[in-house]
Image (spheres, helix red, strand yellow):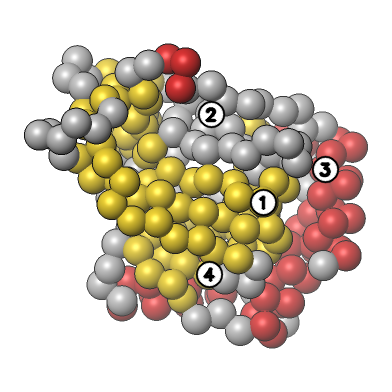
């Protein structure tokens, strides 16, 4: 059975070889099954201290920590399981490149670019310390005009690579989606988050994730 670190390194290398900020990656059914089995093994010993609700609105379970700046971090991301709610993140970039595999559900991406002379919506740019998005360190006084320039959807078994510089927002088109994410070493010390100038459009639905929810998630992974 392939190890998660080995799988992650292969996906990241293939993504970098493509020399694009975003690209789909080849991912076989046998690799998908191996990834599921490896994740299930991790979840059998997972404790709640490895689980946190990310400020962008999803639950993150850390499977392997980043020990030095150039080490890979492996996480499981779980989006809101409320079937009546379609969640969309704030627009953001990352402090690292990453490769992700959709283990369940469907993940939609909207990609953005700045268009200063457009009639598009305006956003505040906030910068956060690398890796957490918990501690705001800088808020730009200049509003940015951002427009959607492309979209994509990743279904079960699909894999993709994304540069840390790529501006995007994830839309959970199928509530309860689960992705396995392999993060490269840190590429920059700050990440940017863009929040709409109209606060009414910045509503996020947070949900509780406790030991019972962790047990249910483990059961779901085991049944796939």
The x and y percentages for residue 168 are: 38, 46
Q: In this view, does 42 lie above or below 51?
A: below
> What is the distance, in whole Å, between disc 1 and disc 2 at their CAs?
20 Å
Q: Which is in the foreground here, disc 3 or disc 1? A: 1
In space, the residues marked 2 and 4 are separated at their CA atoms by: 24 Å
Among numbered discs 1 and 2, the one appearing first in the sequence: 2
Label 2 Cα neighbours within 10 Å, binned few <14 / some 14-19 / many ≥20 = some
Q: Which residue lies furthest to the left in this view?
A: 117
Q: Earlier in the sequence, mark 4 or mark 3?
A: 4
Q: Going from the N terminus, do you reach mark 2 or mark 4 first?
A: 2
Q: How crowded is mark 1: few (under 14 residues within 10 Å), some or many (20 or more)?
A: many
Judging from the image, what secondary structure is the residue with disc 2 in? loop
Q: Which residue lies furthest to the front in this view?
A: 119
Disc 3 is placed on an element classified as helix
Alpha carbon separation for disc pair 1 and 4: 17 Å
Contact, CB < 8 Å: mark 4 with mark 3?
no
- Quarter where residue 52 is shown: top right
Query: Which residue: 53% across, 29% down?
Result: 55
Where the N terminus falls, by quadrant?
bottom right
Residue placed under numbered mark 2 in the picture: 55
- Asked whether 147 or 100 is in front, the reply is 147
């Amino acid at each position: 059975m392939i190890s998660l670190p080995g799988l992650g390194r292969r996906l990241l290398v293939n993504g970098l070889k493509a020399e694009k900020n975003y690209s789909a990656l080849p991912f076989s059914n046998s690799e998908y099954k191996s990834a599921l089995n490896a994740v299930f093994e991790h979840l059998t010993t997972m404790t709640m201290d490895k689980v946190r609700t990310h400020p962008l609105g999803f639950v993150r379970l850390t499977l392997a920590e980043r020990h030095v700046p150039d080490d890979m971090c492996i996480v499981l991301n779980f989006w809101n399981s409320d079937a009546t709610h379609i969640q969309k993140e704030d627009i953001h970039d990352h402090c690292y490149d990453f490769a992700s595999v959709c283990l369940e559900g469907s993940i939609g991406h909207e990609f953005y670019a700045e268009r200063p002379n457009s009639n598009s919506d305006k956003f505040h740019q906030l910068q956060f310390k690398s890796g957490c998005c918990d501690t705001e360190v800088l808020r730009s006084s200049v509003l940015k005009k951002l427009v959607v320039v492309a979209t994509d959807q990743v279904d079960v078994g699909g894999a993709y690579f994304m540069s840390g510089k790529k501006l995007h927002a994830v839309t959970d088109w199928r509530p309860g989606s689960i992705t396995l994410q392999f993060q490269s070493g840190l590429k920059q010390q700050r990440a940017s988050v863009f929040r709409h100038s109209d606060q009414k459009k910045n509503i996020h639905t947070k949900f509780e994730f406790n030991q019972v929810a962790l047990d249910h998630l483990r059961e779901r992974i085991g049944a796939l």
